[in-house]
Amino acid sequence: MRKLKIGIIGCGAISPMHAVPVGLYKNAELAAVCDIKKDRADRAAARYGARAYGDYIEMLEKERPDAVHVCLPHYLHTVVSKDALLRGVNVLCEKPMSIALKDAEANVKLAEEKKLLYGIIFQCRYNTASQFVKRNLDNGRLGKVISARSVLTWNKPDSYYAASDWKGTWEKEGGGVIIDQAIHSIDLVNWFIGDEPVSIAANLSNRNHPKAEVEDTGEGLIKYKNGAVYGFYAMNTYGCDEPIEIRLYCEKGKAVLSYEAAQITFNDGKTESVVQDMSDAADYGAGAKDYWGFQHIKQIHNFYDCLLNGKRPDIDGEEALKVQRIAEGIYGGAAGPIRRR
Ligand SMILES: NC(=O)c1ccc[n+]([C@@H]2O[C@H](COP(=O)([O-])OP(=O)(O)OC[C@H]3O[C@@H](n4cnc5c(N)ncnc54)[C@H](O)[C@@H]3O)[C@@H](O)[C@H]2O)c1
């Protein structure tokens, strides 16, 4: 089988979670990496045995890769993905898909027209706990979700925003705790419920980050066509990163997901549980993400399998639009002291 030629655009914090899985896929090679901060591209190129670029258009045109991974600040996601799609290159982009729904929708259409794959990273769907709960919903053992809730209390101190030239701004991050951190848990619950949202009421505020423009606290309620209701709460001004907790109250039982574990209690009192085998995490090197959600490798390899076999990836543009529409609903209609500019 031929080897896929891969490029990575953006060599910042998340890039090892993309670069290492390329090397661990038999039929792929990391040909090129790009960062506008050329020293970062040079370092990544030396580490992974790739060619370094400072300009992604030059990289796309000289290398003509089969696919690029977009690991950039949020405001560049749809711009750079579009530039790649227009040049016939398949795209796997980090979350969030976009900071504006219309740009995300336009890219989905473009990818369809060009017959290219457009995938968006939501790696937490591959956690053992998430897969276990989803399986028990799909096979009917839990019945339909009646109510759901998610709670995220993480720690993003002032230094986190001070260290970044894009986080904390409406223009470049496109939001705060909701679009950056809680998007994973909102995506998971929406995927579990598997129905169409009909109303979103939300409240956003910035309570403890005077140097950031965006919200550090968000809560709301999403109602679904089938009657399910989902309440979420997220804040990133807690003292540490506590495990995200998701609870589902279903027709035939309850599910609780927390960090690497999930437990289901069926209505007859029987319980079943799973715990993630953390030893299946690849070695991503110092400073790489080791907290909730290290399953990039599974999603990346699914994307490559689909590229080689002419299939649609698990989380393609259409699938990712579902949570993107929710994000738009939250930011577009939120009450509270803070508004998207
Ligand atoms: N899936 C997850 O769990 C997860 C975790 C962390 C970050 N992320 C996402 O990954 C993306 C990147 O986040 P990060 O933490 O790595 O950010 P970062 O700031 O550490 O890295 C971004 C990199 O992009 C480079 N860049 C900016 N403009 C560029 C351009 N025009 N051309 C080439 N390079 C350019 C910057 O120089 C920087 O090195 C974001 O979308 C973020 O939300 C996802």
Image (cartoon, rainbow, N blue to C red):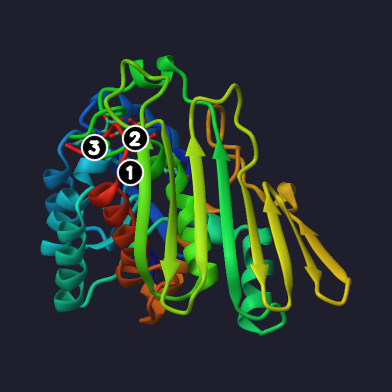
Indicate the position of residue 133 as horizontal and vertical percent values. Answer: 66, 68
Determine the residue positioned at 15% across, 75% down: 114
Q: Quadrant of the N terminus?
A: bottom left
The amino acid on which the numbered mark 2 sits, given as a three-letter code, is: Cys
Say whether residue 93 is visible. yes
As drawn, the label of residue 6 is none
Labels 3 and 1 touching (C-beta < 8 A): no
Q: Quadrant of residue 92 in the image? A: bottom left
Q: Does mark 3's beta carbon lie closer than 8 Å to ligand 1?
A: no
Q: Does mark 2's beta carbon lie closer than 8 Å to ligand 1?
A: yes
Mark 2 surroundings within 10 Å by alpha-carbon count, few (fewer than 14), some (14 through 19), many (20 or more): many
Label 3 belongs to which residue?
A: 339
Instruction: Name the secondary structure under disc 3.
Output: loop
Indicate the position of residue 192 as horizontal and vertical percent values. Answer: 55, 69
- Residue 235 in the image: above or below residue 70: above
As drawn, the label of residue 71 is 1
Calculate the distance from the C-alpha at mark 2 to the C-alpha at mark 1.
Answer: 7 Å
Instruction: Name the secondary structure under disc 2.
Output: loop
Q: Earlier in the sequence, mark 3 or mark 1?
A: 1
As drawn, the label of residue 11 is 2
Determine the residue positioned at 23% across, 50% down: 332
Q: Does mark 1's beta carbon lie closer than 8 Å to ligand 1?
A: yes
